[in-house]
Image (tube, rainbow, N blue to C red):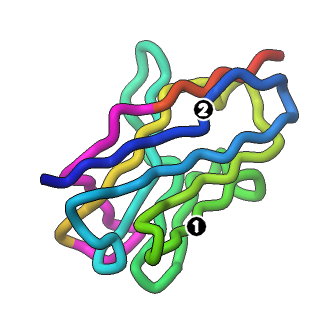
Amino acid sequence: QVQLVESGGGFVQSGGSLRLSCVVSGRRISAYAMGWFRQAPGQEREKVAAISTGGSTDLADSVKGRFTISRDNAMNTVYLQMNALKPDDTAVYYCGIDLSTTSARTIRPHYWGQGTQVTVSS
């Protein structure tokens, strides 16, 4: 059974920073692409950032230059560092693992975490 647990969300003012963590159990993440997605109320879930097994990253245009995704295979954990946050970043953020690809560009998660709320005030 693969389980993902996100943490690090919260309430922050515009321009602030947060660091999200996603701890995975049940599989070693070193063999799989990992990603962060978000879903705002009334909107579809969208890809924010993904990282390949080799460390290559793929970021949404809206977060380039502000967000960084990284992975620590020894800790079986993926991180999302979010800087210069904007109210439009407000959403529930989900971590996902794709068991069929190593590529950040083509990631389509098989398993998801429960999500962590990020709220950015103006």
Dominant SS type (magenta): loop
User: Is disc 2 placed on a helix, strand or loop?
Assistant: loop
Residue pushed farthest bottom?
54
Residue pushed farthest left?
1
Q: Point out residue 63 in the picture as x, y percentages from the top left corner.
A: 67, 49
Q: Is residue 98 above or below residue 42?
A: below
Q: Nearer the viewer, residue 47 or 76?
A: 76
Q: Is residue 43 magenta?
A: no
For label 1, the residue is 70
Q: Point out residue 109 in the picture as x, y percentages from the top left corner.
A: 26, 53
For label 2, the residue is 9
Amino acid type at image mark 2: Gly
Marks counted in the figure total: 2
Sequence-first tag of 1 and 2: 2
Residue located at (25% from left, 48% from top): 3
Q: Is residue 114 magenta?
A: yes
Report the Cα–Cα distance between label 1 and label 2. Answer: 17 Å
User: Is disc 1 placed on a helix, strand or loop?
Assistant: strand
Structural crowding at the residue carrying mark 1, measured as other residues with C-alpha within 10 Å and reported as few (<14), some (14–19) or many (≥20):
many
In the figure, residue 100 lies in which quadrant? bottom left
Amino acid type at image mark 1: Ser
Q: Which mark is residue 25?
A: none
Residue range corresponding to the magenta coloring: 101-115
Left or right, residue 11 beside residue 79: right
